[in-house]
Image: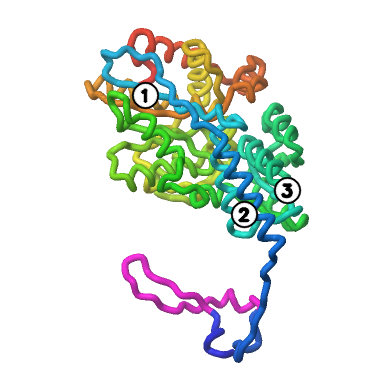
Amino acid sequence: MPPSLSRGVLERSDDSFEITRVQRPELDSVPMADAAVTGTHDINRYDAAARRWAAEAIRKVQADQQRSADTHLLKMPLPDDWGVDLYLKDETTHPTGSLKHRLARSLFLYGLANGWIREDAPVVEASSGSTAISEAYFARLTGVPFITVVAASTSSEKVRLIRSYGAEVRFVDDASTVYAVAARTAAETGGHYMDQFTYAERATDWRGNNNIAESIFRQMSMERFPDPRWIVATAGTGGTSSTLGRYIRYTGRMTGLCVADPENSAFFPAWSAGDRSLVTDTPSRIEGIGRQRVEPSFTGPVVDRMTSVPDAAAIGTVHALEQVTGIRAGGSTGTGLWAALRLVAEMKDAGEQGSVVSLICDSGERYLDKYYSDAWLAEQGIDAAPYRDGVLNFLESGDAGMLTD
């Protein structure tokens, strides 16, 4: 075997810049060329028709973004004398009704620019529902077929919305198998596996370009505490928290990033232990966030604080939010808002002034058969009422009570 084709990889140690070749016997089974290429050879794969199609698809996605307004930043009604302001970034106003619209747009642009998404070849995704809704929208916009693999427990309204964009929905009983089934489906159909859980953190331009972090700080610029003390996010792919954390550091701000995590999720125990290999054996009941493994797009070092949130607290919080503001939101919003209210209470009790920002991730109308269903809550053994009442009591009296228990 010519030296130029010797098997092995180049590796660099974490504590030095020395690069060495490390032999890798497991690579011996990988087919390799018989000899190094010599002489002049030319392979031309330029495809003008494919390039024109991709350019037009990118134009359509960018034009759609140009037509869309920014999402609203809502201020929660808290007493001014608390010295702490709470804001909610309402991502439900995107055309597909959720925070995942930003991600889907970025993933499509990333896939098109990389030459992965092709005319007439299906795009395939593993999803808990909301990303699939948004990707189905962009698939229809660009004219490519779309197939999503979701858990059988996905809310019926999400499934209806996915199909409304002409997409195909395939179900799996075991939520942990969505990745493998989606990858196999893409291979069998000659399509592209979008793989949001790997590419979310790199498809989004975290330096700016109207990402969610840049939008928050721009909208906060005229508030009495323009740089939030805390921004609270939740984690599904980990892409949003990665974008927020990187942008905060990139722009030299002192804002802290708190990630709220539901029951049965691997993110909190893995982050607290510093071990990304930790997994859980039960899927999250809060759709869209909390995973049984730490997803590749979760960037732990940019997270300053994590809060594990009981599912009953998340659901009770969105019930309280609806009573106070008329906004009906999904469970992931409640997970983040519970953590945000804890931060507000902590700052208030410490006499610390400042602002806290959390996210309204999607509408509660997608979960009428779950988080707003007495029958489903009873079936799950979830009593959200004490948490709802605790939030309402805090907003009315300032008594944090169970928020700080």
Between 22 and 88, which is closer to the camera in this rendering? 88
What residue range appears in magenta? 8-31
Cα gap from disc 2 to disc 3, whole angstroms:
11 Å
Disc number placed over residue 342 in the picture, else none: 1
Residue positioned 64% across, 81% down in the render? 32
- Name the secondary structure under disc 3: loop
Image position, residue 101 (x, y; %) = 57, 37
In-image side of 105 versus 209 (left or right): right
Image position, residue 81 (x, y; %) = 26, 13
Say few, some or many: other residues with alpha carbon within 10 Å of mark 3 (under 14 / 14 to 19 / 20 or more): some
Which residue bears the numbered disc 2?
112
Q: Earlier in the sequence, mark 3 or mark 1?
A: 3
Q: Please say if 85 is above or below 302.
A: above
Q: Earlier in the sequence, mark 1 or mark 2?
A: 2
Which residue bears the numbered disc 3?
144
Residue positioned 54% across, 84% down in the render? 6
Q: Residue furthest left?
A: 351
- Name the secondary structure under disc 2: helix
Tell me the kind of residue under disc 3.
Val
Between 68 and 106, which is closer to the camera in this rendering? 68
The colour scheme is: rainbow
- Name the secondary structure under disc 1: helix
In-image side of 111 versus 266 (left or right): right
Tell me the kind of residue under disc 1.
Arg
Between 255 and 153, which is closer to the camera in this rendering? 255
Residue 175 visible within the image: no
Cα gap from disc 1 to disc 2, whole angstroms:
42 Å
Mark 3 against mark 1, which lies toward the viewer?
A: 3
Image position, residue 349 (x, y; %) = 26, 19
